[in-house]
Image (cartoon, grey):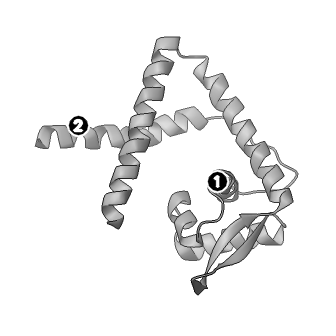
Amino acid sequence: MKKQAEHIADLVGMLPVFIGTLLDDIEISTPYKLSDSEEKTLMFLHHHEGSPMTTYSKKVGLSRGSFTGVVDRLQEKGLVERAPVSCDRRKYALILTTAGKNVARDIDNQFKRHIAAKMTLLPPKERDKLAAALETVIAATEMLTAGKEG
């Protein structure tokens, strides 16, 4: 069991290298000057709009304080709005504005085109294996998250 856990730890340690290789030379172009954190936030909101800010800060990998600054800047640019969460006046959900939806959709499309171009470097069988492996990683992430919350 320990050997398997060590092997998994070694593989997880390689994930940043994989992501770095995959995202190497990506250039996202928008009419707004956006930081990487702002782009990530818009992309995540594009797929998961309406959750509390703490959910997004964890997903984007920022502390709540740092994430608040990202949201402030996106709100100043007119790309997001804070909406009160009905059950708790202290919590806010994030909602994309019309401009935010357009920018987020554009970022997502550019991201997908970049990944598609990178995937042409892999043979079809390797792409299939990669897709299956990533689906397994996502499923494991959801199970680990559910275990942490429950």
Seen at 63% across and 30% down, the residue is 115
Seen at 59% across and 66% down, the residue is 51
> Would you name the residue on which mark 1 appears?
40
Q: Earlier in the sequence, mark 2 or mark 1?
A: 2
Q: Where residue 76 sits in the image (x, y, percent)?
A: 82, 72
The answer to whether 12 appears left or right of 43 in the picture is left
When the figure is inspected, residue 53 is found, relative to residue 27, above or below; the finding is below
The three-letter amino acid code for the residue at tag 2 is: His
For the question of whether residue 80 can be seen, the reply is yes
Q: Where residue 25 sits in the image (x, y, percent)?
A: 67, 34
When the figure is inspected, residue 71 is found, relative to residue 16, above or below; the finding is below
What is the distance, in whole Å, between disc 2 and disc 1 at their CAs? 30 Å
Between residue 107 and residue 150, name the one nearer to us.
150
When the figure is inspected, residue 130 is found, relative to residue 81, above or below; the finding is above
Q: Where residue 43 sits in the image (x, y, percent)?
A: 67, 51
When the figure is inspected, residue 115 is found, relative to residue 62, above or below; the finding is above
- Pointers 2 and 1 in contact (CB under 8 A)? no
Q: Secondary structure at mark 1?
A: helix
Q: Where residue 71 sits in the image (x, y, percent)?
A: 69, 70
Seen at 43% across and 21% down, the residue is 129
The three-letter amino acid code for the residue at tag 1 is: Lys
- Quick one: label 1, few (<14), some, or many (20+) residues within 10 Å? some
Between residue 15 and residue 136, name the one nearer to us.
136
User: For residue 93, which quarter of the picture?
Assistant: bottom right
User: For residue 119, which quarter of the picture?
Assistant: top right
Between residue 59 and residue 47, name the one nearer to us.
47
> Would you name the residue on which mark 2 appears?
7
Q: How many marks?
A: 2
- Quadrant, the C terminus: bottom left
Seen at 83% across and 48% down, the residue is 30
